Image (cartoon, coloured by chain):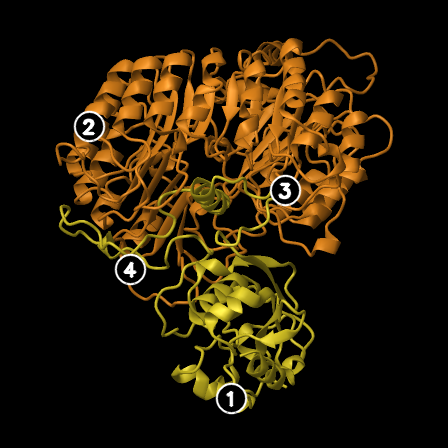
Chain colours: A orange, B yellow
Amino acid sequence: HCSPSARPRSSSRAMSEEDEDQAGAPPKRPRAASPPPPPPPPPPDQVLDNVLETVLQFLRAPGDRGAASLVCRSWHRAESATRASVAVRNILAASPARAARRFPNAHHILLKGRPRFADFNLLPPGWAASAFRPWAAALAAAAFPALRSLSLKRITVTDDDLDLLARSLPPSFRELSLLLCDGFSSRGLASLASHCRGLRVLDVVDCELNEEEDDEVSDWVAAFPRGHTDLESLSFECFTPQVPFAALEALVARSPRLRRLRVNQHVSLGQLRRLMALTPRLTHLGTGSFRPGDGAEDEGLDFGQMLTAFAAAGRANSLVSLSGFRDLAPEYLPTIATVAANLTSMDLSYAPVNPDQVLLFIGQCRSLETLWVLDSVRDEGLQAVAMCCKKLQVLRVLPLDAHEDADELVSEVGLTAISEGCRDLRSILYFCQRMTNAAVISMSHNCPELKVFRLCIMGRHRPDHVTGEPMDEGFGAIVRNCSKLTRLSTSGHLTDRAFEYIGNYGSSLRTLSVAFAGDSDLALQHILQGCSKLEKLEIRDCPFGDAGLLSGMHHFYNMRFVWMSGCSLTLQGCQEVARQLPRMVVELINSQPEIEKTDGVDILYMYRSLEGPREDVPPFVKIL
Amino acid sequence: MAGADVDVGTELRLGLPGGGAEAAKAGKRGYEDTIDLKLTLPTGGMQEDSAGKPEPAADKAKRPAEAAAADPEKPPAPKAQAVGWPPVRSYRRNAMTVQSVKIKKEEETEKQQPAGAAAGANGSNFVKVSMDGAPYLRKVDLKMYNTYKDLSIALQKMFSTFTATGKIRHRNEGKMVEAVNGSDVVTTYEDKDGDWMLVGDVPWEMFVASCKRLRIMKGSEAIGLAPRAKDKYKNKS
């Protein structure tokens, strides 16, 4: 068992290890849902519990809830009984039975699976292919009878899982959101559509669906029941096959509550116009291809018609978010200017918009708070954004060509412009080929509200391209001057000094991603000994070894996970961690299963868990 | 067929076209004049080829050598690209490959590209890959590879999860078995004319230009394909 000095502090988000230490599950509270016989006057301590529950319902923030649950047993009981939003940020860390015992009245459940680096092909497929199965079974067995919404992120979900859920979820169930999931196909969607009565939200975002033969793709859109649906949100931008438009149009026509509609890239501009006519009060629109098609809906389509369509949306004043543009026909881009004034969010990250095209609408975007673009907008485009979008809080500049030797499209010029124009910036993700310390330092001074700073200089080990120096000073300034910073991703040539800064000043950092950086174990030591609030650490291809890893022993139980790949760890070092921290699941993963590796550790992925090591372990994973 | 008494010689390999140790073992298959592309299922044994990488991402398939503590001033080897770097998801990477090719074309010709999201002629060439017994299809972008060897490595990776978890149904037992005892499989493709050919018969470029989809099937079902392929392309050239 863990020693007092390593006693886990309750993370504000994940299930706390305190549960186990407080001897058993909390007793079920009697609920007043079913009509009871007239109750005797409650004993004094139960009066307190009832009052507690009533009061605690007003506590929403996960951090507050976690803190409240640690006060004492009765607070723990009351908080557990009244917690409506349950987040299991690592489904391997807690079993559904445990979650259901503690939080029987959950309304919203969030489950997260794979670590983020799996998005970049660093984790072989099938790493935790059946992790969701027990959850599906538990949900189907009414483990959470009051469940209203389920959000899954980075989880492998099969068609059978979806079918099981669709048929068995409680009647209160309304919302399903699948983000960055995989393992299912149109068949699973069809099950949801046909069996999930009263579904209000079906959002399938950035998922990788299984390929299907063309003639086997299920028409899930047509599978929704006849008559009016309760749909409020429907998102399927990542659905690769074509959805029959007649079915889609019919569904939208009989969904009077629809407010968010995000369609895939096969929906043409003419079809979009038809859908927009059916949904005058849309708040979020995913525009599909944004290009005229060949079908009947696009006959005679011209600029004027699209302008009228968007102008109508603009007058309705409800549209706040635009996305899609998956195959943008640039001559139609100006039509969005008529709605631009009301937009708070715009995702152009699949549209290679150039600076001239940006100028066609950006002047209207005075209310924009979130903007995702490709670096095709270039520094000039970013300068325009900086001038016009004074309320900008979240900016992502993604690469048109994601290669180390791609053309330089944006640089420190764009970053500086943004920092000078958008003083309210909270979060930035910026891909570029060249950067300077001066620009990063400038942003650290201009944008004190920054919580997320993710800079990706695409060439590995690239220094400041003007001075030739490492990027240490830039990142140092960010951690020093941005006191609210909780998430940092580094890139470029960084020495141990950068991590000394991060350790010394990054006291509020919760997530840190490091790639191709540092000189020695000292860097890792700085991180682990300095960043006391660190919860998520992702490291790839850095010269860090066992000494660095072991310097974090005092802190690992307070973290959600540590990922280290391509570093210099050895089996002995990882075994030492596993030995000293029995509640950590220490996984050694071979990223190339077909090549047997005998020396060194390829990927270390370790996470705390209440359940111990998982049982379904693929051959390329070794749990210490 | 391949039963429990089979020795290492019948292990499934995705062999090099025309050479290497695997081809010698492939000789027993009987297609002397053709190149066998057999799927090697992971048995824990060594593969002699260089590191292949999982998905058909746009970057090449080599690990960065500079993971060890090298001189920090030394720039990385110019041609070796790292897996998953820059950190962009493959879906976006692939979508942008199509887009950026279109833009280059538009800039050159100043003409609108034909509408539709189908793979561009130069951008990408996604074909469906099915494996008999696998629960679902995959897709590969043939433009990502330069040789049969690269393709074979990718296919191996793609379907290794099925075999590693025993999902391939083998004829001799009719239930999930470990890959090492499995039956032979070969890779075939459907060409523009709708004919099914063995992969590996023709020069790579010709293959890419004519391949519409791939299918990994039982070896015995592929008997008889080889002679047709040879004749067909003999007449064409």
Q: Which kind of residue does numbered mark 3 sit on?
A: Phe
Establish if B72 lies above or below A435.
Answer: below
Q: Earlier in the sequence, mark 3 or mark 4?
A: 3
Count neighbours of disc 1 (C-alpha within 10 A) and say few if under 14, some if 14 to 19, many if 20 or more. Answer: few
Residue A190: x and y in percent read: 75, 43
Q: Earlier in the sequence, mark 2 or mark 3?
A: 3
Q: Which kind of residue does numbered mark 1 sit on?
A: Asp
Nearer to us: label 2 or label 4: 2
Nearer to us: label 3 or label 4: 3
Labels 1 and 2 in the same subunit:
no
Q: In which chain is the residue bearing label 4?
A: A
Q: Which mark is residue A239?
A: 3
Disc 3 element: loop
Rounded to the nearest angstrom, the CA distance separating label 3 from label 1 is 43 Å
Label 2 sits on residue: A437
Label 4 sits on residue: A600
Count neighbours of disc 4 (C-alpha within 10 A) and say few if under 14, some if 14 to 19, many if 20 or more. Answer: few
